[in-house]
Image (tube, rainbow, N blue to C red):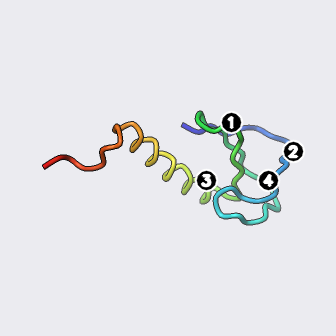
Amino acid sequence: MPYELKVQKVVENRCTNCGRVIRDNPIVVKTCCVNKPWVFCSRECYRQFVVNWTRNQDAAKGGGRLRKAI
């Protein structure tokens, strides 16, 4: 599961999810599978990322089979 980092200065000034320019305090998150931190402009962008990230992790855990054999 991604965890939030406490960062004072962020190098990136665009949201990783939507690409918007970040003007105020960004949300910086680190995941287990990506060595680079993800930067988000709002809680809504972060929530969308978590939903998609969790869906992708669950699909990978299933062994690549998305449907049950008939």
Q: Amino acid at mark 2?
A: Lys
Question: Does 53 appear above or below 18?
Answer: above
How far across and down, in percent of the image, does residue 4 sit? 67, 40
Residue that carries the numbered disc 2 in the rendered image: 9
Q: Any mark on residue 46, and which?
A: 3
How far across and down, in percent of the image, does residue 60 sit? 42, 40
How far apart are the alpha carbons under marks 4 and 3?
A: 13 Å
Q: Amino acid at mark 4?
A: Asn
The front one of 32 and 27 is 32
Q: Secondary structure at mark 2?
A: loop
Question: Does 37 appear above or below 40?
Answer: above
The front one of 32 and 47 is 32
Residue that carries the numbered disc 4 in the rendered image: 25
> Of discs 4 and 2, which sits in the foreground?
2
Q: Secondary structure at mark 4?
A: loop
Q: Amino acid at mark 3?
A: Tyr
Q: Earlier in the sequence, mark 2 or mark 1?
A: 2
Q: Secondary structure at mark 3?
A: helix
Q: Earlier in the sequence, mark 3 or mark 2?
A: 2
Q: Amino acid at mark 1?
A: Asn
Q: Quadrant of residue 7?
A: top right
How far across and down, in percent of the image, does residue 36 sit? 71, 40
Q: Earlier in the sequence, mark 1 or mark 4?
A: 4
